[in-house]
Image (spheres, rainbow, N blue to C red):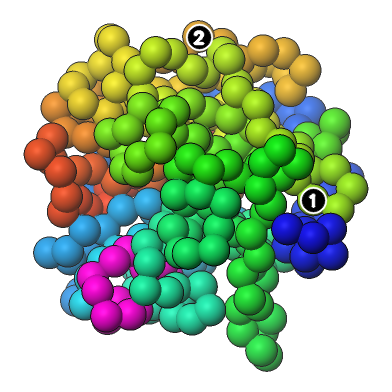
Amino acid sequence: MTHHLRRLAIAGIAVLAGAAFLATVAAAMHFTAWGPVVVAEPAGTNSVNTAAHDGCPIESPDGLSLFIASNRDGYTGSTRNLDIWVATRASVDAPWGAPQNLGEPINTGADEFCPTPVRGNGLFFVSRKAGGCGLGDVYFTRRNPVHGWSEPQNLGCAPTGPNSDLDEQGPSYFETGAGAQLYFSRSRTAAQGGAVPGDIVASELSGGGFGPASAVAELNSTSNDIQPNVRKDGREVVFSSNRAGGQGSQDIWVSTRASTDDPWSAPVNLGTNVNSANSESRPSLSWDAKTLYLGITPPAGPPGDVYVTTREKANGK
């Protein structure tokens, strides 16, 4: 990918920085335990979930949009692949409206999934369309209120960019006082899918784009460690893993650190309120970190549904 295109791909991301964000990074954040997961069904007939496969849920920073991946009716192209959809609501207390397909140029006849909205109307996501670096790559697009979504730009191929000839999943963008990083997972072999063993990696934003990705050693094991989502202050990360000590299949695990200069703590399983014998995947934290979305799929595989759980600040705020 040319330097020019990489600059286009990250246009607008820099607006995420600011004094208010750095103040948030410095603030301590302590929470209660997560409550039991419930299926993410809004009131009425505007269902987030369908009989098709629905997953990869994540809220926009303002809490008014819920992005998901689904192969429900209304998909783009001639085959039933995953597309990115979005449900909206008028306020954070209102039910979600019916999800709408984002359409072209984001969705194609290939799989598009793991949407990750960021401030400034930006969206990272994964696509398995032809012409990328490998099996699945991370792309970036930005929505203009008048002209709609821009043509998605590949973040660049290794050895200078973050994408490889393997399968990338679950991008998570966050900023710290030291700069901006993109966490995601990468398969260890040239194969696709959540059951293919993967590792969590990180890429730094520098100059005209994201650089090569390196493994986050503290979060990885010999098992399948995938789809990380980092809290906005960079001090908590949730991800999916089938490592020993879980409830069965893929579970959601969490790791924390006192500051972004410290290593991540040993990952801890979120327990039976969140995890089960089913496969829990692609967890994501809301902007205030009090809501956790995830996909849950039977051990035999899709279709799956979107679920949600909540927690409170330990001081009650």
Task: Give amino acid for label 1.
Answer: Gly
**Front in this rendered view, residue 284 or 169:** 169
Residue 254 locus on image (x, y percent): 46, 23
Which span of residues is magenta-colored? 74-91
Judging depth in this view, the residue of 58 and 133 nearest the camera is 133
Q: Residues within 10 Å of mark 1 (few under 14, many from 20)?
A: many
Q: Residue at x 53, y 43 (%)?
A: 165
Seen in the image, is 274 located left or right of residue 234?
A: left
* Residue 172 placement: quadrant: top right
Query: Can the viewer see residue 203?
Result: no
Mark 2, residues whose alpha carbon is within 10 Å: few (<14), some, or many (≥20)? Answer: few
Q: Which residue, given by chain and number where applicable, does mark 2 sit on?
A: 266
Indicate left or right for 142 with 92 as reference: right
Residue ID at (28%, 34%): 195
* Above-or-below relation of 134 to 256: below
Q: Which one is earlier in the sequence, the residue at label 2 or at label 1?
A: 1
Kindly state the secondary structure of the residue where label 2 is placed: loop
Q: Label 1, on which residue?
A: 209
Q: Is residue 80 above or below residue 16?
A: below
With 291 as the anchor, is 70 left or right in this view?
left
Q: Position of residue 262 (x, y in %)?
A: 72, 13
* Label 1: which secondary element: strand
x and y percent of residue 305 in the render? 22, 53
